[in-house]
Image: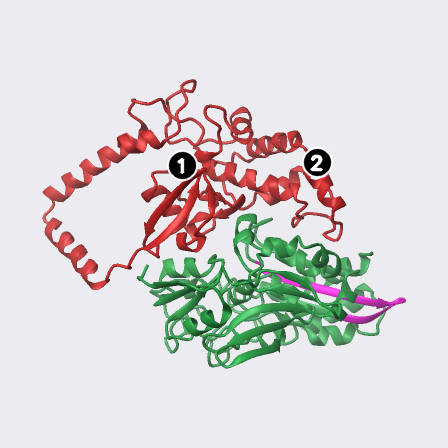
Chain colours: A green, B red
Amino acid sequence: MKPFAFTRATDADTAVQAATQPGARFLAGGTNIVDLMKEGVEAPDRLVDINRLPLAAIEAQPGGGLRLGALARNSDTANHPVLRTRYPLVAQAILAGASGQLRNAATNGGNLRQRTRCPYFYDVTQPCNKREPGTGCSALQGFNRNHAVLGTSAKCIASYPGDMAQALHALDAVVQLQGPSGRRTIPIALFHRLPGETPELDANLAPGELITAIDLPAESARFAQRSHYLKVRDRASYAFALVSVAAALDMEGSRIRQARVCLGGVAHMPWRAREAEALLQGAEPNMALFRQAAEAALAGATGFEHNRFKIELAKRSIVRALETTSRSTA
Amino acid sequence: MTSLLSDERQADDLPDDDSNSPLLPSPAGQLTRRAFLAESGTTGIAGILASAPMAASVASAAQANADAAPPSSSMALALRVNGKPHALQVDPRTTLLDLLREQMALPGTKKGCDHGQCGACTVLVNGRRINSCLALALSHDGAEITTIEGLARGSELHPMQAAFIKHDGFQCGYCTSGQICSAVGMLREAEQGAPSHVTADVRRTGPMAPLSDAEIRERMSGNICRCGAYPGIVAAVREVSLAMPRAASSRRSRA
């Protein structure tokens, strides 16, 4: 591992200032960046340890929402009574990811920033546009079983590896940021990004910008009665998703007032299936409708040599997740 | 080697066939497997270097690397490890795992994959289980660390250690210290009412039913055992889990 300077920050202003220097990175739980540093994928000149910043609280908001501190650990977040009862989809998604040990270390902010597990991104001897822009994408013609089928570009077909974020996207979470030029708030839909021509960027963040909190809006608690996170993977636990589905329904009598469907494992970012959501809205739930929604969600999908199976798998997973969701009750 | 041995927990009523085992420390004064391997390894490498023609170039390459990469300046770190305070100086690159094994002579914590994929390096930090291989030591300044060496009380094994022996929860033993530390941390999480991926409804907070085998397997899935000793591991964890007082979770539910 390349030597680096280590700074312990005790307040957000100092942390942001230190992280604005070129070559600086934040260190929270470390479960991803330390691994990347061991592999030489990340080689920061300075780590800014933000673990002492007062950003670990999970607080109910006056308007009925819930604020998840960026430094609250994944395990504490998943076990928070308000999150469990009002936003169970988020708890389910967190618990579907990683292991007990990793969730105890990993933070909510860090979870949003975790990087793809594309094997070529991790292998510094291979070309990779995400790691080293302009070198090419080895996955296009390589082993691409775990890669994206939606929203890919000729520069990158990597998939986003997380679970929690699918639930946050489905529930229209809002990300609180603090940067060198002040604070700002962005919808999570605008936080992650597709690879396009600049796959080296995973998120729309300015240099030195720090996630301080993730807000769950009060209105998203209406999905608490019916939501489900389905994760399909190669083994029963402790594996990244081949495909995952965060599904949520808000019912009005026998009809769907609002539906949320967000896919994981299929794109460079959590993929909101808005066409599927539009089909579901106002309709009465049934299997034919779910199949129609699934077809709509994957209509634009393009597979590669080893991951074409994901398209059919994603459709079936959407149907299963919606079926499970529609059956769940208070 | 003597300093290494003297730091290992002693127990005079246990067999001496495997000092490397987290369960079975060896009596003082005997040659242990660790000591033997370390000793013969050093001799072996020296022998090879002395006789190999490339010895000089290997040595000079190593020197060049050292020159090219200026050493990170070490920083102060205070930790309590297994109940004892330590004031340390560490290179910022040092993981908690390497600190324990290389700098503190606590080799009970194992390095398996070194990438957070196997759980062999699991230790308890302020009572919570984490992968020590992915934890930079400096980010845990002031923490209370418990390793496998700190679970027993004198010669009395921790109930989880005793249960692993009783139920044959290991074969080669390499994952065992991580399994045991993980299981201890996991039962504390369950005691605090934490749900898991296989919990039927995360919305139901409050006291939990005794952990089913499915719950134990899911909650222990961060610890891989290549020998496949899982049936014994689950049996050991189940036994300790059932013997635990459940008062804590009831208290919590009323709060």
- Quadrant where the N terminus of chain B sits is top left
Q: Is residue A144 above or below residue A232?
A: below
Q: In this view, does B90 lie above or below A90?
A: above
Magenta part of the chain: A241-259
Q: In this view, does B133 lie above or below B165?
A: below
Report whether mark 2 lies on the same chain as mark 1.
yes
Q: How crowded is mark 2: few (under 14 residues within 10 Å), some or many (20 or more)?
A: few
**Residue B55 falls left or right of residue A313:** left
Query: Dot 2 falls on which chain?
Result: B
Residue B87 is at least partly visible in this image: yes
Q: Does the magenta stretch include residue B159?
A: no
Label placed on residue B108: 1
Identified at 41% across, 62% down, the residue is: A122
Q: Nearer the viewer, residue A201 or B3?
A: B3
How far across and down, in percent of the image, does residue B32 sit?
31, 27
Judged by depth in the image, the label closer to the viewer, 2 or 1, is 2
Amino acid type of the residue that numbered disc 1 sits on in the rendered structure: Gly
**Residue A306 falls left or right of residue B53:** right
**Residue B28 falls left or right of residue B69:** right
How far across and down, in percent of the image, does residue B164 sit?
53, 29
Q: Nearer the viewer, residue A138 or A122?
A: A122
Instruction: Measure the alpha-carbon separation of dots 2 and 1.
Output: 32 Å
| Secondary structure type for disc 2 | helix
Query: Dot 1 falls on which chain?
Result: B
Amino acid type of the residue that numbered disc 2 sits on in the rendered structure: Ala
Q: Nearer the viewer, residue A321 or A86?
A: A86
Q: Residues within 10 Å of mark 1 (few under 14, many from 20)?
A: many
How far across and down, in percent of the image, does residue B45 sit?
19, 41
Q: Which of A179 and A144 is in front in this view?
A: A179
Identified at 50% across, 48% down, the residue is: B130
- Which residue does the numbered mark 2 point to in the structure image? B247
